Amino acid sequence: MTEPHWIIHLPTTLTSVDEAAALSMALRRSLGHVLAIDFGETTLSEEDRQSVRTRVWCDAPLSRSRRCLLPVAHSGRCR
């Protein structure tokens, strides 16, 4: 049996999804070296609608166990 993974819910005072996405991007840039954080699975939700989530990153599988690092609605090929 595998151990469960844990989710950290980090509330903010931000009032728009664009601001929240920008914050998640800044956190990824500054904390991307922390291997315990899976930024590819980052989602956003409104405070009172936490079951409705918006993905931030594409996270599509690439070669050699890598995943796309671009935002979810990117144009062009995954990188």
Image (tube, rainbow, N blue to C red):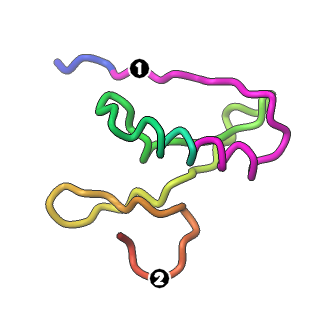
Residue type, numbered disc 1:
Trp
Considering the numbered disc 1 on the image, is that residue within a helix, a strand or a loop? loop
Give the mark toward the camera: 1 or 2. Answer: 2
Q: Main secondary structure of the magenta part?
A: loop
Which numbered dot is residue 76? Answer: 2
Say which residue appears at 85% left-offset and 39% top-offset.
Answer: 15
The residue range painted magenta reads 5-24
Q: Residue furthest front?
A: 30
Q: Earlier in the sequence, mark 1 or mark 2?
A: 1
What x and y, as percent, mark residue 65? 19, 55
What x and y, as percent, mark residue 4? 32, 19
Q: Residue furthest right?
A: 15
Residue type, numbered disc 2:
Gly
Considering the numbered disc 2 on the image, is that residue within a helix, a strand or a loop? loop
Say which residue appears at 54% left-offset and 62% top-offset.
Answer: 72
Is 55 placed above or below 31 here? below
> Which of the image's four quarters has the N terminus?
top left
What x and y, as percent, mark residue 27? 53, 38
- Residue 31 is one of the magenta-drawn residues: no
Say which residue appears at 59% left-offset and 23% top-offset.
Answer: 9
Name the residue that disc number 1 marks.
Answer: 6
Is 38 placed above or below 48 here? below
Q: Nearer the viewer, residue 46 or 74?
A: 74
- Residue 20 is one of the magenta-drawn residues: yes
Q: Residue furthest bottom?
A: 76
- The residue carrying pointer 1 sits among few (fewer than 14), some (14 to 19) or many (20 or more) residues within 10 Å by Cα, namely few
**How far is mark 1 from mark 2, CA to CA?**
33 Å
